[in-house]
């Protein structure tokens, strides 16, 4: 093969080395959570760093599961505690539908739920 027809090998470089990574933020919910759990879904078409963040007042717990709704006993990841400030991160989330559950623990909670997705790209 000459230089014109030779294929270059695939080079894997960190996204940050090429340019600033592209993060997509989606507000899933903003408002009051009362007595019942609130459910949301996020579909990832390809592998990505995926984070769900809850901020606000009151006390809610956060559960995430790939493929089906999470319960308090059946989940992939959870973040619990006496506040509404929680975060769950998947370093390299598989493609699929992620189900997010907010479970109020005491009274009325005013919260904002944001999903952040950082795509991975390969360049030749």
Image (cartoon, helix red, strand yellow):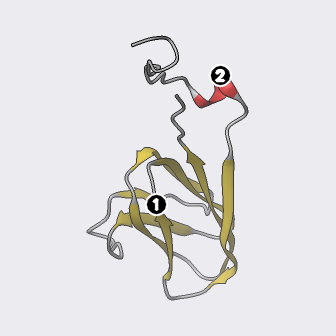
Q: In this view, does 18 lie above or below 37?
A: above
Tell me which corner region of the image, top left, top right, bottom left or bottom right, holds residue 114: bottom right
* Image height of 1 relative to 64, above or below: above
Disc 1 crowd, CA 10 A, few/some/many (<14, 14-19, 20+) = few
Q: Position of residue 76 (x, y in %)?
A: 32, 58
Residue marked by disc 2: 17
Nearer-the-camera pick, 95 or 85: 95
SS at circle 1: loop
Residue 89 percent coordinates (x, y): 49, 48
Left or right, 82 with respect to 46, comes to: right
Residue 3 horizontal side relative to residue 114, left or right: left
- Identify the residue at image location x=50%, y=11%: 3
User: Considering the image in quadrants, where does the N terminus appear?
Assistant: top left
Q: Name the residue under label 1.
A: 45
Q: What element carries label 2?
A: helix
In this rendering, would 67 be left or right of 38? left
């Amino acid at each position: 093969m000459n230089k014109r027809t030779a294929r270059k090998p695939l080079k894997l470089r960190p996204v940050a080395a090429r340019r600033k990574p592209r993060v997509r933020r989606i507000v899933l919910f903003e408002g009051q959570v009362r007595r019942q759990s609130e459910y949301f879904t996020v579909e990832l078409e390809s592998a990505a760093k995926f984070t769900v963040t809850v901020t606000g007042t009151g006390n809610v717990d956060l559960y995430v599961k790939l493929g089906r709704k999470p319960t308090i006993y059946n989940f992939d990841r959870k973040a619990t505690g006496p506040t509404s400030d929680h975060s769950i991160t998947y370093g390299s989330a598989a493609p699929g539908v992620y189900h997010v559950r907010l479970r109020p623990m005491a009274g009325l909670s005013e919260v904002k739920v944001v999903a952040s997705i950082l795509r991975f790209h390969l360049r030749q």
